[in-house]
Image (tube, rainbow, N blue to C red):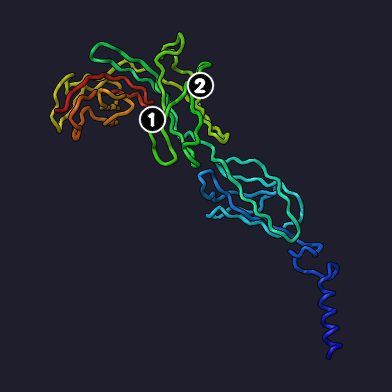
Amino acid sequence: MKRILFIFGLLFITGCYSDAPHNNPYDIHNPNAHGEIRGSILNYSPAPVKGVKIYLNDNYYTITNDSGWYRISELKPNTYILTTERENYASAPETVEVMAGSTLTKSIILNFIPIINESKVYSMVIYDIEGITIRMAVMEATISDSDKIEDISSTYVHILDTNFVLSPVHSEGPFTELYNNTIEKLGNHSVDELVGNSFTFNTADIHGGQGSFNTKLYNVVDTFPNIIYPQSQDTVSQPALFIWHSVSGYSKYNLIVFKRESSIFNPVLSYSLADTFKEIDGLAPGYYNLVIFVDDGYGDKGGKKIWFMIP
């Protein structure tokens, strides 16, 4: 009996030596042992990023799940270049070393490249009842950054060797902001002379992501609809039917109401209309400006401004 136990113990000890057969692919003593890489992909929110393709030495291996998790197993021990691919995201290549019989945890933060969802340049000509005419080019961009909109570090428009910084106007969602600025004159160039020129919108975030888009100014509208009601300085009782004359050649009108102490870019009411009338109700007591524009279809506008009072 003692001999049997001795032989069994000897076999057990021998089986633990490194030169014994090892079929487990993750056994470090197996000459054909494998390793694996696993981890999560996040953005700067931080939030998991699904659908990220994972490459090792330019060969596709896997894709992240809904939780941003990935796993690559049965890798031969080696040094690999890990890269990722996901639309609107940027990342630098990572060097990873896979060891036999071990698991490497590699989590990566990807930067969402800021997107210019919509950018436009349009002319706005306003004929004031007091005889003042304002001619301007309006530059507007809606920009998204799915990491954090606070990551946006600069937004500007380049035209004729000049940069115009765009300022945030208001939020259009948790990751989207509207930016704008205006030009009444650029050096010796009037707004009319900017028609046809290229406007390049640019944005960047604090992590180095950049986006750009080109557009142009199409037209300057030198006409406006005459307002029938209300007349300037009228006291208006609500509900009120605002009425204006049609303008030949135009089928689109914009009605904008904003407080007298505020800006036309911060309206209380704003409508795009095919009709030449609109019932207005719900305005708080106070003094307001009213502008009725014609719109040429590209957003270029010509309008007349009056003011009225709500008692």
19 relative to 254, above or below = below
Is the residue 209 above or below the residue 250 in the image? Answer: below
Nearer the observer: mark 1 or 2; the answer is 1
Q: Is residue 1 above or below residue 246?
A: below
User: In percent of the image, x 82 and y 85: which residue is there?
Assistant: 5
Question: Which element is circle 1 on?
Answer: strand
Quadrant, the C terminus: top left
Q: Residue 162: horizontal and vertical position, in percent?
A: 51, 17
Q: Which residue is mark 2?
A: 158
Residue at mark 1 to residue at mark 2: CA–CA distance = 19 Å
Mark 2 and mark 1 in contact (Cβ < 8 Å)? no
Query: Which residue is most to the front?
Result: 2
Q: Which residue is mark 1?
A: 169
| Number of residues whose C-alpha sits closer than 10 Å to that of mark 2, classed few (under 14), some (14–19) or many (20 or more) | some
Quadrant location of residue 245? top left
Judge by depth and name the residue closer to the eye, 246 or 293: 293
Please name the residue shown 41% across and 32% down the image. 178
Question: 36 left or right of 287?
Answer: right
Residue 287 in view (yes/no):
yes
In depth, the one of 97 and 203 nearer the eye is 97
Instruction: Identify which residue, 140 or 170, lies in the foreground.
Output: 170
Quadrant that contains the N terminus: bottom right
Relative to residue 10, is residue 295 drawn left or right?
left
